[in-house]
Amino acid sequence: MKRQYRLCVADIDRTLRMKGEGLPELNRKAFIAMHEAGILLGLASGRPLWEHVETLYLDWDLGFQFDLLIGLNGGEIYDVRKNERTAINMLDPESIKYIIENLKQHNNDPFIYRNGYVLARNLNGRILKSINRNNYEVRIAKSLDEFWDEPTAKVLYGADSQEELKPIEATGKSLENETICCFKTDVDLLEFQDRHNSKGEALKRYCKSNDIDLKDVIAFGDAENDIEMLKIAGYAVCLKNGMDDVKAICDDVTDYDAKDSGFGHYIFDHIL
């Protein structure tokens, strides 16, 4: 007998789709079938909700909005049915300055999210690719101190390759403290945020508010920023293309990768 779940929550990029690509048709059908079966649906992203996360249901032609939207790795939560938005645990200016000043040695420029745009130091290859993929506004900072003139949810560093990111990650890990944590969300992307934020903490808050037992949640992900969400969900599934340390903490791994509808295959084979 297949297990019944009240909520299905999934990461987006490299979980539901490959970056820059549309939602595979089988995944779209899986969302529609779960919605019709009365299962609540959620998306959990590292991006801010304004960066297309709130409108994905339109892009994907679902005909309904998701019940839960998590942005900024748990820094913002949108309970759609209650129309409640929550922003939590921003990095303070001193923490932002501490991160950026200590990473100057690598000659790699940071970027951060502000309300409705991205603030960057230079238009490097990583940012240009992201602009072309997501079509958001980018503003160039005249000096580094513009990055810490107000709180922000996270600080990001991109690289042109996995090897180029390694020394940046090593320095980043050395900066972790009781407030700051550092992790990869892709092989060439490093992020810093308040360690009290995570997709898992956001999921916990939503479930408590809606009287949902965490054992009745199934979660899907692929990267380090999904780990806390996957750990606390009743059942955790990593995509075939996911990182090895993510696969290690999950209950199962899909037979297909994100490009080949791994999520949709798993839903129809194991849940519906």
Image: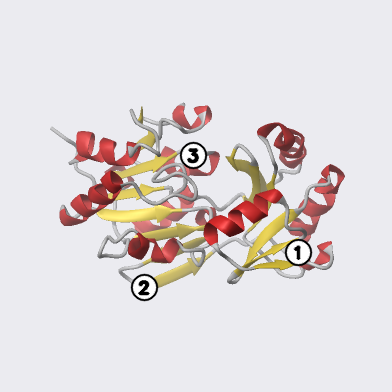
Q: Residue at x 37, y 35 (%)?
A: 237
Q: Position of residue 67 (x, y in %)?
A: 32, 61
Q: Nearer the viewer, mark 2 or mark 1?
A: 1
Placement of 176 over or under 110, stated as above or below:
above
Give yes or no for contact between labels 2 and 3 (Cβ–Cβ under 8 Å).
Answer: no
The residue type indicated by label 1 comes to: Phe
Q: Which mark is residue 147?
A: 1
Q: Nearer the viewer, residue 232 or 156?
A: 156
Placement of 7 over or under 237, stated as above or below:
below
Badge 1: few (under 14), some or many (20 or more) residues near its Cα, within 10 Å? many
Q: Nearer the viewer, mark 1 or mark 3?
A: 1
Q: Position of residue 113 (x, y in %)?
A: 63, 63
Residue to which mark 3 is pinned: 227
Q: CA distance from mark 2 to mark 1?
A: 31 Å
The residue type indicated by label 3 comes to: Ile
Q: Which mark is residue 83?
A: 2
The residue type indicated by label 2 comes to: Asn
Inspect this view and state whether residue 129 appears. Answer: yes
Inspect this view and state whether residue 179 appears. Answer: no
SS for tag 1?
A: helix
